[in-house]
Structures are given as C-alpha cells and as structure tokens.
Amino acid sequence: MRKEGIRMSKIYDVIGIGVGPYNLGLAALLEDTELDAVFFEKTPEFVWHPGMLIERMDLQVPFLADLATFADPKSRFTFMNYLYEKDRMFPFFFHQHFQIPRQEYNDYLQWAADQISTIRFGHTVVDVIDQKDHYQVVAEETATGEKVYVKAKHVVMGTGNEPLVLDGMDGFPNEDVMHSSRYLFEKDHLLKAKHVTVVGSGQSALEIFLDLLEEQERQDMKVTLFTRTGGLFQLDQAKFAQEMFTPGYVDYFHQLSLDQRKEALDTLKPLRKGIDPDTLTQLYTKLYHRTAGGENARILIQPMTEVNDIEADEDGYLLHCRQWQEEHDYTYSTEKVVLATGYKPHIPDWFMDRFQDAIEWEEEGMYKVSRDYHLQFKDEREHHFFTLTNLVHSHGAGATNLGLSVHRNVHIINTIAGRTVYKNQEDTSFQQFSMKHFN
C-alpha cells in the first residue's frame, strides 16, 4: 500500500498515537471514509505480543472480535476476508473452532496493517501541544532522529500497556528473571535450566507453564507455578455473564459513581481475571496422563502464594514467599523465574507534563472520561483528546476486551465526524441493567 507523505501544513481530522489492535482497528475503519488521519507507531513494523506467540495457544475471544466486523461486516478488513485472501476459508471451515490461534491473529493484524495507508511506523510521538482549537503532534523518526510537526483537530492515544514488575523483582539479567512478555525471546535460556518457576495467576502464566511442560518431556527440568489466587479458577464464560461485555452494559457502568464502579469491578473479577477453561483442561489432562502408573509429575503448583521478593544466590535465585491463608513465610530456591504478573497502562511522560493540570481526575491515576472516550478538560472544547488506555475505571471490564474495541472505535469516529458513519449496535443484551427504562 502506497503511503502518502505527511502534510505538515494541513490540519488532519485525527492523529492516532500508537498502533496496537485498538488503534489499528480505528485506522482500518477510517481508511474508506472522508476523514483525514495519520497514525504514528514507534516500532518498525506491526507485531502483536511477539514474546507470547506460543504455538497451540488460541485467542480467548471469538474471531468475530476482529478489526471491523461489529461496525461493518462487509469491510475488507474483516477476519473472514483475510481468510478468503489467504486461501484459508476451507481449512478454517473444517477446523470448526470459534477461537483462532494467536499466531494467526497476529498474521491477520499484520495483513491489515500492510493495507492501511495512514500508518507511519518507526515514528515515536514525543509531544502533543494544545493549540486551543487543534493539537500539534510532534513525532520523531527512529532511523534519523528527525522530528515532524503535524496538526489535528482530534487526537486518539492508544499507547497500550507495559509490563508490570513489582519492586524488588527487577534489575536481574533478562535471561534469568523475565516478564512473560519476553518469554519466547528468552526461552532457550530457560530450557538450559534444571528448575524454572512461573509466578502468576492468569492466562499468560498457564500458557507458559503448559509450554514448559511440553518441553519438560525432552529436558531434565522441574517446573513450578506460584499463584496468588486461591486456586486455578476459570474464566466465567456463561452466556449471561458475557453480556457484561455488551455496549448496553458499558452505558450502564459509565453512568455509575466512581465508588459504584469500583464495587462493580470487584464483582466482575471472574470475567476479568480467570483462565480459559480449555487451557485448564489441557493442563489437567496432561498431568493426568503423565502420572498414569504412578509416574512423577515433576511439577509443583502452589496457590495462595505471594512472591514478595527475589534474591540472587549461588544456585540461582531465592524467592521470598508467603502462603497468605496460613500466614506462613518461606524461601524457595529456583534457577530461573518467569513473572507473569500482568501489565499496567502506559501513560507517556509528555502526557502528564502537558495535560495533568488541564483535565479532570476522578482519583489519582484515574482521569475522567466521557462515554465517547474523550478526556474531560476543565475548559469546554470541540477538539477532543480521546484515549484507548486506562479505561477500566470509567468503562468497565470491557475496556480491555477485543470484542468491544470496534464498538469503542465507532463511538470515536461518529463523534469526530459529527454524524453516524457507522451504526452502533442497540438492544445488545437480554438483561436490563438500569431501572431508568421503567421511568
């Protein structure tokens, strides 16, 4: 796809900052509209979680949660069109699975990115200046260090998440103590070890643990899993529970007070923090077969365990642990550590420098966001700063769900255009969450 040059004298309708699946979907939906856009991404090409593209692992949401289907099933950027273009329609049909491999999802996103004319890879946004009736975005080209200055009526910040590593667990060599985001990059080092410990309670921890069990059959290696949760609990995939990922529930959640939203998030933990049931079944089946005839499983799975510190010693590392239910502290020796401790929103330094005092905050770390996903400024304005990052407190569990990302992008596009470019889905759940419809 030929990319037009950046027009620095023009005021674009929107500039996107960062290109992950969310902003990639926004760029795809904008591609065939009259709206002028440009998207900046610091990496040289599109790669989705490259350190976690483990073979045999599927995406947790159905393939319909692609870049475009919920907005326009006829779009050329749907997953079904990807299959058609790649001559994989019949294999997918016979495969008969609603979920798709993570590696194929990554290839689909790369296929879409290659066709979108508005994306500029290798450009890091280093500043955004509020010019009262528009924004000036400053992007630095990675290869040359040259800066470009581009104007836009609206900005969409999609800077994603960054690895969450607790204090006391950083500063060690990557080949020894690594975040799960680096798993495949460091896997060769792990396979040389006699003992690997995975720390985490979520999907990534289980996927890594399962992958190491596959390798264990060829390696003389012990594998340990420490989880803080009370057990390996599965994601709630019941039909009515999944309605919490509908636009109707987002409408309801957003109008609650902050305290009510926090309380609601606590009740929705099984929808947000669980493990895919198929992954748990794979693990249990593997361990059952492995131990047939009295064979040793060569694993340790210890729930209710916090890892509070890591200390290097001559044999590798000592983990300072606490079994929180029994209130028992102990140390555990291992050679390598994988920290599947999740992610936190990545908020660029320039954002806080430029906008911290200009916007409204609900609480420290929680900026106030409209239903249409733009930040609430202290002054009235028509040039909006939209965010796709750090939205759980304002829009609920679905803020990080791929199935709702297209719905979010429809809201943003329609707000920017001042008209209905894409239809928003209505009557999306059988449950009624609010009493207001009785009035």
Image (spheres, rainbow, N blue to C red):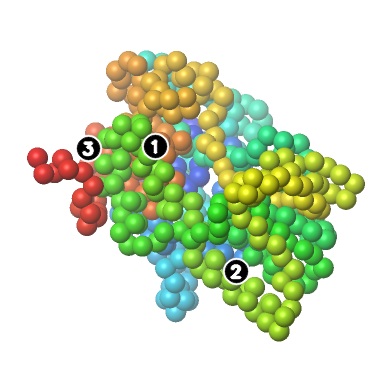
Q: Earlier in the sequence, mark 1 or mark 3?
A: 1
Secondary structure at badge 2 equals helix
- Residue that mark 3 sits on: 419
Q: CA distance from mark 1 to mark 3?
A: 33 Å
Q: Nearer the viewer, residue 119 or 346?
A: 346
Residue at the spot of label 1: 262
Q: Is residue 111 visible?
A: no
Give me the C-alpha separation between circle 1 and circle 2: 33 Å
Q: Is residue 259 left or right of residue 276?
A: left
Amino acid at the residue labelled 1 = Lys
Report the residue at 65% width, 37% height from top: 166
| Mark 3 nearby-residue class (10 Å; few <14, some 14–19, many ≥20) | few
Mark 2–mark 3 distance (CA, rounded to whole Å): 49 Å
Residue 349 locus on image (x, y percent): 57, 24
Q: What residue is pinned by disc 2? A: 283
Residue 360 percent coordinates (x, y): 38, 21
Residue 193 vs 285, above or below: the answer is: above
Q: Earlier in the sequence, mark 2 or mark 3?
A: 2
